[in-house]
Image (cartoon, rainbow, N blue to C red):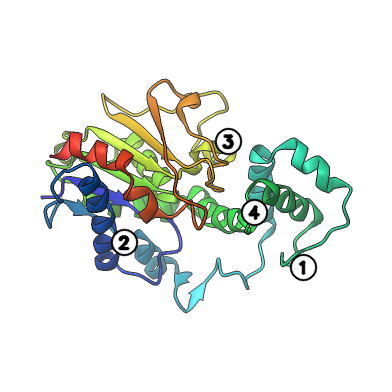
Amino acid sequence: MARIVGVHGIRQSRTSKEQLTNDWSRALNRGLGELGRPDLSADALELPHWTGLLARGANHLGPEEDRFDVAVPLSEEEVDFAATALEEVVRQEDLARVQQLELQTLGLPQLWPARLTRLVMAYDRRFPRGGGKLFVSMMREVRFYLYEPDLAAHVRALVAESFSGSTAVVIGHSLGSVIAYDLLRRGEIAPDRSSGVRTLVTCGSPLTIPSVRRGLNVTDGEPLKLPGDIAWVNVFDPGDFITGGTGLSALSPEITDAEVDNGIGNPHSALRYLRSTQVADVIAESCQ
């Protein structure tokens, strides 16, 4: 029976549950190995492929019709959400430096409004190698979950089915951390399936961004909370563009931050987070 339920992030429409489970298991086992702990059992991890559910239900996220593809223009609502989120994480000194510059798109979509383009340019000063553009891309899918309640409910229901009485740890990466938190706080998992949950691990979580929390009806200044006595460990990389490089502990005394270094190639990578000894330590304490 699954001791760990994983909730993946965005851009997984071209993979499968089997592939994701194999990749996540190998990454988790690498971290456990560095601690000298045994590998997970073959059935320890359950990882529902929620992107596949949306692809079938909405006919948007499949490999042949992706509403978030870079070739698909942003809607006005997407522009506003992404720009507002950027305003909440961009450094004011970086924004001030680009305000006087002529708009140089530097590979950015030509049809983006000036407000968004300048914010992306400013964010790139802190997170080079296209951090601002990647942030906008991910915010499109985050917004989709937050403001499509019927589809979001289907996602939560699918994830909830993956729990069993032996589930001890929930791991959510990127948008998956938002889904995991939303599911747990709503209490939508049957009591006989959720009673053993001891820990939530969030990795690369956009819950650091006020706009994302407001989309979950968490008002500014309201602490993030989980029901019961579930511990919350948030793993973050200061170089991770999707989090603004910050943790979650300042938002709630119930959250413990663990800082990692995922390298410069892709600090938001799920597998880099999962193979860290910080995540492995939680798994070892809660599941083995």
* Side of 274 relative to 140 (left or right): left
Task: Identify the residue position indicated by label 3 in the image.
Answer: 210
Residue 49's tag is: 2
Q: Would residue 186 be visible to someone looking at this image?
A: yes
Amino acid type for the residue under numbered disc 4: Pro
> Sequence order check: which comes first, mark 2 or mark 1?
2
Task: Identify the residue position indicated by label 1 in the image.
Answer: 110
> Sequence order check: which comes first, mark 4 or mark 1?
1
> Sequence order check: which comes first, mark 2 or mark 3?
2
Query: Which of label 4 and label 2 is nearer to you?
Result: 4
> Sequence order check: which comes first, mark 3 or mark 4?
4
Amino acid type for the residue under numbered disc 1: Gln
Element carrying mark 2 = loop
Q: Quadrant of residue 188?
A: top left
Circle 3 residues within 10 Å: few <14, some 14–19, many ≥20: some
x, y percentage for residue 215? Answer: 53, 41
* Side of 65 relative to 90 (left or right): left
- Measured in 3D between alpha carbons, the distance from the residue under mark 4 to the one under mark 2, in whole angstroms, is 31 Å
> Sequence order check: which comes first, mark 1 or mark 3?
1
Q: Are marks 4 and 2 in contact (CB under 8 Å)?
A: no
Query: Which of label 1 and label 3 is nearer to you?
Result: 1
Task: Identify the residue position indicated by label 4 in the image.
Answer: 128
Quadrant the C terminus occupies: top left
